[in-house]
Image (cartoon, rainbow, N blue to C red):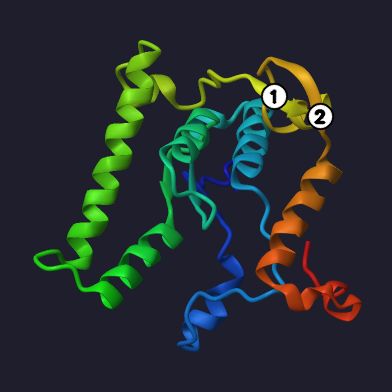
């Protein structure tokens, strides 16, 4: 896509919900979709584009349900994301506003406060390591991997030091499935589990 002129790549764990949105059913994905960890996806795409010599020709935007804390944002940006949309965090803020109705605060103001808090947190993280501009932090990989094996690091976090080997891609898939099964206990039945899209 980048070689054809695409200037933005969107990594989105709600892409399959487009039909539901068109039908007015919202963004609920249901139990048949297992999400890839966004940091793994961002890192793998980032390094693939570098290997192809086209990383500077495009931006990576991530829309994910798996990002809510400042650390999540810092890792995604540090491994190549240009922008992050934490759509579930925003949805929770809207839901909280609708149920609790805090006096003097609109849902939009609460979302703006969240956005500002994330930005302040990112500035604090960057300032602790002497980085003053986000552009210098993006894709810099100023981290150390702990508990990932060499194959995972080579795929998505190439160049990041790792002293303690650990989880493989299969282990990460099993962990993602474990969280998924906690969310959707009905998948414990073999017939439902066989229908998952990987």
Residue 5, above or below 31? above
Q: Around disc 1, counting alpha carbons within 10 Å, would you say few (fewer than 14), some (14 to 19), or many (20 or more)? A: few
From the viewer's perspective, is 22 left or right of 147?
Answer: left
Which residue occupies the extreme bottom position in the image? 23
Q: CA distance from mark 1 to mark 2?
A: 8 Å
Pointer 1: what residue? 146
Q: Residue at x 28, y 50 (%)?
A: 114
Q: Residue at x 70, y 65 (%)?
A: 182
User: Looking at the rendering, in which quadrant would you find the C terminus?
Assistant: bottom right
Whole-percent x, y for residue 144 in the image: 62, 19
Q: Residue at x 86, y 45 (%)?
A: 170
- Image mark count: 2
Residue 108, above or below 124? below
Any mark on residue 29, and which?
none
| Local secondary structure at mark 1 | strand
Residue 75, above or below 85? above
Residue 30, above or below 7? below
Pointer 2: what residue? 166
| Callout 1 touching callout 2 (CB < 8 Å) | yes
Q: Place residue 163 in its image quadrant.
A: top right
From the viewer's perspective, is 141 left or right of 148?
Answer: left
Looking at marks 1 and 2 on the same chain, the residue that comes earlier in the sequence is marked by 1
Whole-percent x, y for residue 54 in the image: 58, 31
């Amino acid at each position: 896509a980048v070689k054809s002129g695409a200037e933005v790549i969107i990594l989105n764990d709600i892409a399959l919900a487009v039909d539901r949105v068109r039908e007015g059913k919202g963004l609920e994905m249901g139990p048949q979709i297992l999400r890839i960890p966004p940091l793994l996806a961002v890192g793998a795409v980032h390094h693939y584009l570098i290997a192809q010599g086209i990383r500077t020709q495009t931006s990576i935007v991530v829309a994910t349900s798996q990002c809510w804390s400042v650390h999540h944002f810092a890792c995604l940006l540090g491994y190549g994301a240009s922008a992050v949309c934490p759509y579930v965090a925003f949805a929770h803020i809207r839901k909280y506003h609708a149920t609790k109705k805090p006096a003097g605060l609109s849902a939009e103001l609460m979302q703006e406060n969240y956005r500002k808090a994330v930005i302040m947190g990112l500035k604090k993280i960057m300032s602790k390591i002497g980085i003053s501009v986000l552009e210098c932090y993006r894709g810099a990989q100023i981290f150390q991997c702990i508990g990932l094996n060499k194959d995972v690091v080579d795929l998505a976090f190439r160049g990041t030091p790792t002293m303690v080997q650990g989880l493989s891609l299969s282990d990460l898939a099993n962990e993602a499935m474990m969280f998924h099964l906690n969310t959707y206990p009905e998948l414990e039945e073999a017939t439902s589990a066989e229908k998952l899209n990987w």
